Amino acid sequence: MKETDRVMPSGDDRKRSFVLVPLTGIYLLAMLVTLTDLGGSFPFMGRLYSGDKAEELIFANCIISLYLIVGILKRQRLTLWLLIAYNFIASASGMANLLMLPLQQVVTSTGALVPDYGYRITAFSVFLLFLLLNVFLYFHRDRFDNKSIYLW
């Protein structure tokens, strides 16, 4: 086989995969952080769940995150729109938790002593992070070029 017969990946394909690597890392980290809540209470859409209901929500969130991670790695077009929907739901849940949950209830359930301003700044920062991720996804939507709806 000659050196010229080998198919070399173009620079554009390499660039495509490197842009999605940090995105994969963000969702993997988010899944691991969600798993650390296992056994504790879980805030979602302005309510604080505990016990079996919290474990079910954490499990569902981790399964969805795992699907999204694999979809990012496969550059699936459907995953792009699911990521955007997931980010909107997560940001809406964060804002609902910030506005509807009493701070003392959150601090008591987590067992951590967090100042009022620290919790509010963190919750608002997470809200902004999800919105910025949606902007990033929208501008890099051409990177998701796999039109198959299946992950295999």
Image: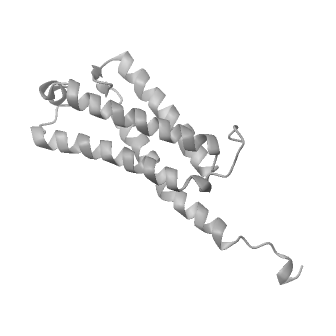
Q: Nearer the viewer, residue 102 or 37?
A: 102
Residue ID at (41%, 32%): 89
Q: Which residue lies most toward the bottom here?
A: 3
- The answer to whether one can see residue 26 in this image is no
Residue most extreme to the top? 52
Image colouring: one colour
Which quadrant of the structure image shows residue 70?
top right
> Which residue: 14% across, 29% down?
103
In the image, taking residue 103 as reference, residue 57 lies left or right, namely right
Q: Position of residue 97 (x, y in %)?
A: 26, 29
Q: Quadrant of residue 13?
A: bottom right
In what quadrant of the picture does the N terminus appear?
A: bottom right
Task: State whether residue 30 is above or below residue 23.
Answer: above
Find residue 121 and report its image quarter. Answer: top left
Q: Is residue 74 above or below residue 16?
A: above
Q: How many marks?
A: 0
The answer to whether residue 22 shows anywhere in this view is: yes
> Which residue lies at the image location 45% right of the left edge and 31% below the top edge?
61
Q: Position of residue 140 (x, y in %)?
A: 54, 56
Q: Position of residue 56 (x, y in %)?
A: 43, 21
Residue 135 % position (x, y): 44, 51
* Left or right: residue 69 compared with residue 31: right
Which quarter of the figure is the C terminus placed in? top right
